Amino acid sequence: MSRELAQDTTSDAASVASRRTVVQRDAQLQARAKAFILYGILILMSIVYLMPLYWMISTSLKQTGSEMVFPPQWIPNPVVWSNYIDVFVQVPVMLYIRNSATIALIATVFGALTASLAGYGFARLKFPGRNFLFACCIASLMLPEIVTLIPEFILFRRIGWVNSFLPLIVPWSLAGSSFAVFLFRQYCLTIPLELDEAARVDGAGAIRIWWMIILPLSKAVLATMAILSFTHHWNEFLRPLIYLGRPELRTLALGLRAFRGEYQLAWNYMMAVALIMLLPILVLFFLAQRQFVQGIVMTGIKG
Amino acid sequence: MSITNAAKLGGKVGGVAHRRSRFQRRQELEGLLCILPWLIGFICFKFGPMVASLLIGMTQWDALRPPRWIGMENFQTMITDPRWYDALYNTAYLSLLSVPAQLVVAFLFALMLNEKLRAMPLFRTIFYLPSQTPLVAAAFLWNWIYHPDFGLANALLSAIGLPTQNWLFDLQLAKPSLILITLWSGIGVPMIIFLAGLQGVPQSLYDAASIDGAGSLARFRHITLPMLSPVIFFNLIIGIIASFQGFFTIVFLTTGGGPVYATLIYVLYIYLRAFQDFKMGYAAALAWVLFLIIMAMTAIQFVLARRWVYYEGGERT
């Protein structure tokens, strides 16, 4: 009787153990199947999302004339690397790059200075109307650019700034990005207040504290702001279109349109210029991937 | 004795208060100084123009001769302007279809990328890459992809035996073709935001739900979605506002508003009125109506959000 019982329990234990291994194996199989399907979808979607970029690159390397065949050459034959040199001769790409870079760099530097100063003020200093003004700053994130565009244009025409870089630099340098102000304020709140207080005891004023203590501690967030600002100006289209009528002032974004319209540039060269325009953004992206992603995440989550 | 003590104490308190107020006053001045550049910019280039836009909207003005005050006439003209209705309809069609579609695709990608498997950073970069393409470059790339004779889109169609299409030049296909562009170029940013949101959902919630017997679908429905609803909400509002501007660049450089006004969107219509016809007054009025519509939509979204957006810690807007 007791032996039977003992046998029973051992067989029970054995079956439980075997069942457990079966369950484990099932789970493992399931996980593997899931990973298999997931990779399948991801690879398929990667092909879909990379296809336009591949088309851009492959077209840019085709011999003039051979981009206009149907069905198209999937792989350029011959591969014409010299397209990337020819394009600088055919159209004034270099000039337009210089214009774009000038605007983007100046606006980015001044924009970062004023935005960080304002962000610091909102975070650290108590003054009347602070909360109201900060609320205005946040609310202006929802103000579409088109609403302010017409009065701004009339103003700049009156003071003779049309056909200069100033309309693209000055507004941004003062209050271009409410988001940058917001970002810097949030960052300032994470810097220990003791640092400010210590500097205060030593007799430093607010501007000095901002310059000597806050800015050196904020390199990461400043990099984020700079990257967002640079890409904004590099890509901007509507405002350059309105303000830069003279051909020699065009930015690369405007130039691209002129190359197709005025210059009747062939599609292989067009794609080469488009890739040249994409290049600095890609370099920035891979150099500062973490900051880039962080900046975007901050845009979305802390809003 | 006690009186002198009190007086002493009073003096001390008074001194502290006095000193503090001086410090406060200095801080106030410094604070105003710090935000001054921003404040000047805000007043000159955001708040001022916003008000000026409304006033200009009540004038007839070609920006050369002095403006003529005409009150609400521009707004009345709008009601009888067939192009205004075209612009409204096309904008609603494009933004209200493309932004939610982008968010759904971005969310699905984020869910897949959130699985802990190898090579995920590579896939993340691949899906994010298109969003880094400058819109102007993307517009020309897609012009070329949609080229009726030599484009990639038609090459793919004919490779699987389907008839080729006119894409951007086709009255029916023009708008869907534009939406397709934004599904390529517009998902990177919301995807990254969703991914960060997903990674911020505490694992303990999922574990607790699993113990209670919740399947993966139930966990998604009752944990993932509510926890991410603020992020979804934020993306929806910002996405729709940004789409007005984004579509301008794409439409301006691809269809130019055609064929037959099929892709004439609101911002393009304002641009044409202001900078081709030089009807600054009418254009400003158009812009202000768009602004009112955006504000109304945002307000409605905030009201609706009470029903479906969950804020951790019970804070609700």
Image (tube, coloured by chain):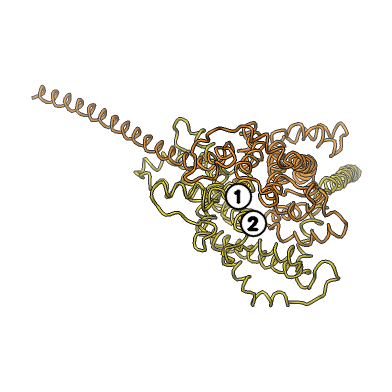
Residue B139 numbered mark, or none: 1
What is the display colour for chain A?
orange
Residue A12 horizontal/vertical position (percent): 18, 28
Image quarter of residue B204: top left
Mark 1 belongs to chain? B
Of the residues under marks 2 and 1, which one precedes in the sequence?
Answer: 1
For the residues labelled 2 and 1, the Cα–Cα distance comes to 9 Å
Q: Tell me which residue sits at (69%, 68%) in the image.
A: B286
Q: Nearer the viewer, residue B82 or B194?
A: B82
User: Does A177 sit left or right of B183 as displayed?
Assistant: right
Reading the image, the residue beneath label 2 is: B252
Look at the image and tell me whether residue A265 can be seen. yes
Residue A257 horizontal/vertical position (percent): 68, 50
Looking at this rendering, what residue extends furthest in the front direction? A65
Image quarter of residue B257: bottom right
Mark 2 belongs to chain? B
Q: Secondary structure at mark 2?
A: helix
Which residue type carries mark 2? Answer: Phe
Q: Nearer the viewer, residue A201 or A117?
A: A117
